[in-house]
Image (cartoon, rainbow, N blue to C red):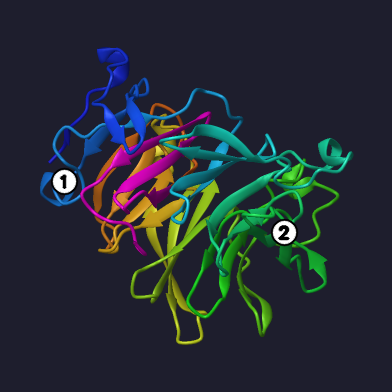
Amino acid sequence: MRGRIMAGAAALGLAMLAACETKGAAALTYAQPAGAEIVILDAALAADVFADGEKVEKLTGDEFGWSEGPVWIREGGYLLFTDVPGNAIYKWSEAGGLETFLKPSGYGGEDAEGVFSEPGANGLIPGDLPGTILLGDHGNRAIARLDLATKEKTFLATEFDGKRFSSPNDLLLVEDGAIYFTDPPYGLKGQDASPQKEQPHNGVYLWRPDVGVTLIDGSLTRPNGVVRSPDGGTLYVTVSDPGAALIYAYDLGADGLPTARRLFSDLTPMLAEGYRGFPDGMAVDIDGRLYVTGPGGVHVFLPDGTPVARIATGTPVANCAFGDDGSTLYLTSASFLARVRLKTTGLGF
């Protein structure tokens, strides 16, 4: 059954949403983005995800080149996210609004413009040590740990098989300290044709502290987002290729390496229909639902691949992450930051 629980803002105007009360702060109101809507594909399944009348909230102005990598910092009650071409990490909170947290977030050398199209950090996730986050550092061509207090970086992996990575993009930390990550060529000027590109493939990797880097899959054209199911048995990877807008699921063995790969969903037909955006960042809730950015916004799937709904913001959405008490989904939506409140809870909260 199809339905819409929020009409597009273009038709309704920029309606102001209900005030959000915060401790020690005045009531705030947020406009819904033009063209925003929540498209329900299965009403019965969506009832566990969205409250009636839920709306998308636009939290910032249109001020970013390409916003990415949101991560909720529980200890401080704030969100960090990146502007990859802008080479910055921003901080947002209900009380403090928007602040610049770190600039440059990636490579800051004088030759950056000649080498990189996107020199900044990309994906951000909670860290492996207290007071840290982990990041896919496009400009420094590495996965790195960032100390939130000192803002100092420690590079964990910079190469595979003696060759530098292209531009590590998204990453996933698991219980034993291992990190899955993707390495497309987006950060390099010219991408695959860049003279700086050393890897012969665009890879999905696993870094383990006691082993180093292992190539999991070198056959994907544009590997991008990476998350795992609640039981740890399935790894999901998106492919942000205009000709193959795909989501893959990998069955994982006890050693964390894949034993099989299957197609989870093919969103390529939506590109032909005119929807903007490619499969990119993802999030998972406690029931194993997958929230995948892609053509037309954030797609919500059951673990078996059944489509539930789509969250549209009016622009392409690059990534999403749960925050607050675990029931708010933050969306990095091209030039702005947005959010939508859900009835479910993100994995790990």
Image coordinates of residue 258 in percent, x first then y, are: 49, 78
Image coordinates of residue 20 in percent, x first then y, are: 28, 32
Q: Residues within 10 Å of mark 1 (few under 14, many from 20)?
A: some
Image coordinates of residue 35 in percent, x first then y, are: 34, 22
Asked whether 254 falls inside the magenta stretch, the response is no
> Would residue 133 be seen by someone viewing this image from the given angle?
yes
Quarter of the image for the C terminus: give it: bottom left
Quarter of the view holding residue 156: bottom right
Relative height, residue 338 to residue 68 (above, below): above
Disc 1 marks which residue? 42
Label 2: state its secondary structure: strand
Distance of mark 1 from mark 2, alpha carbons? 45 Å
Image coordinates of residue 40 in percent, x first then y, are: 20, 39
Asked whether 337 falls inside the magenta stretch, the response is yes
What residue do we see at 31% from left, 52% from top? Answer: 325
Relative height, residue 59 to residue 228 (above, below): above
Disc 2 marks which residue? 153
The magenta-colored residue range is 321-349
Q: For this view, does 193 lie left or right of residue 177?
A: right
Tell me which amino acid carries mark 1.
Asp
What residue do we see at 70% from left, 45% from top? Answer: 105
Q: Residues within 10 Å of mark 2 (few under 14, many from 20)?
A: some
Say which of 99 and 59 sits in front: 99
Tell me which amino acid carries mark 2.
Lys
Identify the mark nearer the N-term, 1 or 2. 1
